[in-house]
Image (tube, grey):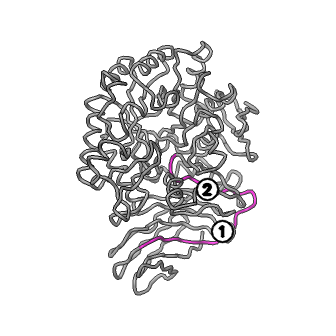
Amino acid sequence: MYNFTPVLTYVENGKKVKSTQLENDLYSLDISVSKKDIKCVIHPKKRIKLFSFALEANKKMADDEVFFLNGFQSWTTCAECKKDDNIPDVMPLSKVSKFTRRIASMSGDYLFTSYGEKGRFHSFTYTYFRLGDNVELFGSRTERTGYTVFEMDNTANLFSIIKDVEGVSIDSDYELMNVISFTGAYDEVFDAYFSSLNLRKPKIEHLSGYTSWYNYFQKIDEKIILRDLDGLDRAKDSVSIFQIDDGYEPFVGDWLECDKKKFPNGMKYIADKIHDKGYLAGIWIAPFSVQRVSKIAKEHPEWLVKDKKGNNEWGCFAWGGAYTLDVYNPEAREHIKHFFDVILNDWGYDMVKLDFLYSEATEPRYNKSRGQIMCEGMDFLRECVGEDKLILGCGMPLGPGFGVVDACRISCDVDLVYGGKYYNRLEANRELPSAQNAINNTIYRRHLNGRVFCNDPDVFFFRDINLKFTDEQKKLLAKVNNLFGDVLFVSDNVGDYSEKNVQNLKDTFKKSEAEVKYAYKTSDDVFEIGYSENGEDHVFSFNIKSGKILSE
């Protein structure tokens, strides 16, 4: 059992004050630590403005022990960290001004956590220490009072459980910590943790099909979509869903202003055509985002999240910059409800892929922490969508989506170049697209699949055009996705496939029956995966940097 010391950081007269006291004239702390539970409630004696709370304990990692880093949101790179590892901050060039720093940082947690120190790393919502096959897991029961961050600082041999409560002022009892812990084998501890949360069960176990993004990006139209829909006839018995991605709307945020030049018959027509094939119809939305040039941004600036100066706050850098609809604005809420109603009920789509969700909670506001805002935002999205339709989350801090979404992206975008583009080499941030990063996260977040939601490892490819992958890299990506994921998408026109690739597609779309025994890195670039299938044991290993398969 750990011997924790409390560290409360609060704001007094505009300055941050740190206190390790259990009680003073401002507050008292009620801390309870057992082998399984770690809890803390603060009892304020007068109004107090919180910043953060931590429970710190001595912990010395063994040389061959690893700490699991669960990245801030679904795109953020995860890792099993050894005690001397260094997780880089955003690239130095981005720090030349507050604006460039903000741009590089807005998709992650860089502005309110620390990176770039050797031997120091942190994990969101849950983490584990693994020594051989023994796993010690710590997990938050709720992010509704603030994000829970687990930090290991090997320079000080210090393990901390931190609650991000920046922006919250209290004058009544407030839960600062509610963490549960389990020790055992990998699958054993994750079974126990997620069972203890009593989560709403996802309504699906497996999806396979098509999404338009990774062949055409925003350059889609009715002709392309219907052609690719017909192309899937070659693998029809293996397909369950067909999803329209970004590009049907004139600007992000103007969801109901369908681009009539590109889709002259409208989006209901497309959904009907998809249903005629016997598939579920999916469609992409960034429900909190409005492009700066959108009709909504111009006509309703009062609906947008504001920064401390009262200006529209950027929520993401995509599409030349986008603002964020404030889910606490009553008119904005009605607007969001309305476009979901039209898309799901009038147009008839069965699943919405909801993207860039992190943008709702980049900063605390309204006396709410980032974690509380994100949880309440996710609850609102489920309310809008209803229980009969499916949600695929993306760009989502994972904890607030537990029990809300049916499926979730657990990796970054794969990109059309296996190793990613030039900015991947610059390490601009940890949310950058590449198949390498996607494969990494697909393996490290395998424990979520089926326990919390269906894991979406992003697409795989078999096409030969508009792509910089070797055949071996395509095979690797498809195998990893099938082995660890249950949302399996291509963006290829299957009508152009060879017969061999049609069969490869059908095989990859099948739900895997493999039982994974272990999966970890044996060196900086080599993963080894042990699994059994059809009564036979297999060892699958590959070099993630090169995409070369070493053994099957």
Position of residue 32 in the picture relative to residue 528 (left or right): left
Q: Which residue is drawn at 32% across and 64% down?
A: 366
Q: Nearer the viewer, mark 1 or mark 2?
A: 2
> Residue 144: percent from the left, percent from the top?
39, 59
Determine the CA span between mark 1 and mark 2. Answer: 35 Å
Amino acid carrying mark 2 in the image = Leu
Q: Residue at x 44, y 45 (%)?
A: 356
SS class of the residue under badge 2? helix
Residue 53 belongs to magenta span: yes
Number of marks in picture: 2
Quarter holding the N terminus is bottom right
Q: Residue furthest bottom?
A: 25
Position of residue 482 in the picture relative to residue 472 (left or right): left
SS class of the residue under badge 1? loop
Mark sitting earlier along the chain (1/2): 1
> Residue 18: percent from the left, percent from the top?
51, 79
Quarter holding the C terminus is top right
**Mark 1 touches mark 2? (CB < 8 Å):** no
Q: Residue at x 34, y 56 (%)?
A: 305
* Span colored in magenta: 50-74
The residue wearing badge 1 is 59
Crowd tier of the residue under label 1, counting other residues whose Cα lies within 10 Å: few below 14, some 14–19, many 20 or above = some
Residue 193 belongs to magenta span: no
Crowd tier of the residue under label 2, counting other residues whose Cα lies within 10 Å: few below 14, some 14–19, many 20 or above = few
Q: In this view, does 523 lie above or below 466?
A: below
> Residue 467: percent from the left, percent from the top?
61, 27
Near-viewer residue (502 or 220) = 220
Amino acid carrying mark 1 in the image = Lys
> Residue 487: percent from the left, percent from the top?
50, 33
